[in-house]
Amino acid sequence: MKKLLFLLILPFLAMTGPKETVKIKTSAICEMCKERIEKNLALTKGVAKSDLNLDDKVITVEFDAAKIDAAGIKKVISETGYDADEVKAIAKDYAKLPNCCKKKVD
């Protein structure tokens, strides 16, 4: 029975590529930012999980390297309206963010 179960699960395991993890510095500010970024990444093909630490504004993303790379993840974050390391937020997407999620100008 265990062998049969293993043989049924094996094809699904083979369909996933190597998992990688990347840490990306963002411009996120609050819980709404966290929810927005993590939701968009969850909807991204190849992203297994993400966790944004608001204390240091760094998001840790686990992903399938056969389906997406770090540059693609940064692009998703920038299209959500936030900076992602050296990739700046897309202006039109940044403009759609609530005021509490925008950088404070001194």
Image (cartoon, grey):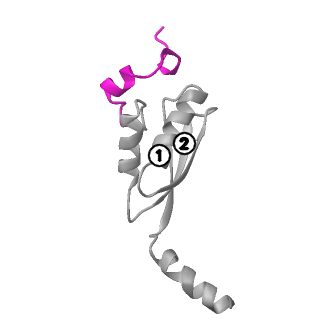
Q: Amino acid at mark 1?
A: Leu
Depth order, front residue of 95/25: 95
Residue that lies at the very extreme toward the right in this rendered image? 1
Residue found at x 50% / y 21%: 101
Helix, strand or loop for disc 2: strand
Confirm whether the magenta stretch covers residue 30.
no
Q: Position of residue 62 (x, y in %)?
A: 52, 56
Residue 41: assigned label: 1
Residue 52 position, x and y percent, is 58, 40
Quadrant that contains the N terminus:
bottom right
Give the vertical position of 98 relative to 28 (above or below).
above
Mark 1 vs 2, N-terminal side = 1
Main secondary-structure element of the magenta-colored stretch: loop
Q: Which disc number belongs to residue 73?
A: none
The residue at which mark 2 appears reads as 59
Query: Residue at point 42% right, 63% down?
Result: 65
* Residue 10 place in picture, x, y as percent: 53, 82
Magenta span of residues: 85-106
Q: In which quadrant of the rendered view does residue 75 lie?
A: top left
Across and down, in percent, residue 77 comes to 42, 39
Residue at x 43% of width, y 58% of height: 46
Q: Tag 2: residue type?
A: Ile
Write down the quadrant of residue 58 in the picture. top right
The residue drawn where x is 46% and y is 11% is 105
